[in-house]
Image (cartoon, rainbow, N blue to C red):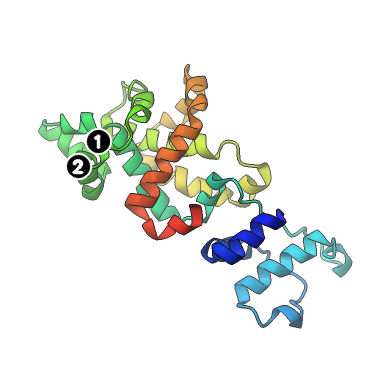
Amino acid sequence: MHKDFFIHIIKHKPELFQAILRFNASCLPTTIPPIPGALQALPEENAKALWQALLEKNNLFQRFGFQHQVSSFWDFTEESRRLVLVEPDAMEQAIQMFGAAIHAEQIAQVIGKDDVLALRAHITPQVLAYALQRGRYQLGTVARIFRSLDTVLPLHQRIILHGRLAVQLCIAPWPEALRTMCSSWIHQVLDANPDSMDASDSLFLEKDNLGHLVENTRKIWFSFKKILLKEVVPQWAPYFE
């Protein structure tokens, strides 16, 4: 853990500190050594998470004779890792909004009845309205990075696929320990609408211009964060800024 980082967030970003505690408490196994009295004055989830960290740091877990290793993750200095603190439902909405902002110009050109119905069947009215209003002006050059990809797919599939692709790019550098701990979160966020994807998930690894996408990961991250915090969960801004 980074001491200076935690001193800073405890003093200046208590919401973020509480979210990190909740994350680690949610990953606790069902059996851990009893929480000592010195920590029991804290809220239960905070006490559990701090006790878990102390057990690991001081290698006390094995001394209690437990067979399974406790796992936790505390290094959230890199902002993109804090996405795991956001509820999957909010992430799903941000994914749709990001994808819709990428393809806002194409959405505005959809006039055929069947095409309109297909969009409405897979993309929420709120997201479509956002794309036709603010969304079409929010991504700029980032939108152009994606627009030429997967053009053989229906528009509603490209919206979801490219929103997920943005998240995949952002979380690709995460440490393996974090990815392992939040594997169910990753699966839920990236497989939220499997019927809208068909066989498209594999395209992420097969794209000829994957290198170009990776080169623009930081730009994509800042754009995704902007949509997440401004359009979906503005109350989460203290967790990131």
Q: Which of 234 and 94 is in front in this view?
A: 234
Calculate the distance from the C-alpha at mark 2 to the C-alpha at mark 1.
Answer: 6 Å
Q: Position of residue 66 (x, y in %)?
A: 82, 65
Check disc 2 and report the residue beneath it: 133
Q: Where is residue 20 in the image (x, y as percent from the top left)?
A: 59, 60
Q: Which residue is drawn at 51% across and 25% down?
A: 215
Which amino acid type is marked by label 2? Gln
Q: Quadrant of the N terminus?
A: bottom right
Vertical order, 201 against 92 (above or below): above
Q: Residue at x 77, y 58 (%)?
A: 69
Vertical order, 43 against 182 (above or below): below
Drawn side of residue 2 relative to residue 115, left or right: right
Drawn side of residue 76 relative to residue 111, left or right: right
Which quarter of the picture shows residue 116? top left
Q: Are circles 2 and 1 on residues that touch, CB within 8 Å?
A: yes
* Badge number at residue 67: none
- Extreme top residue here? 208
Drawn side of residue 35 relative to residue 216, left or right: right
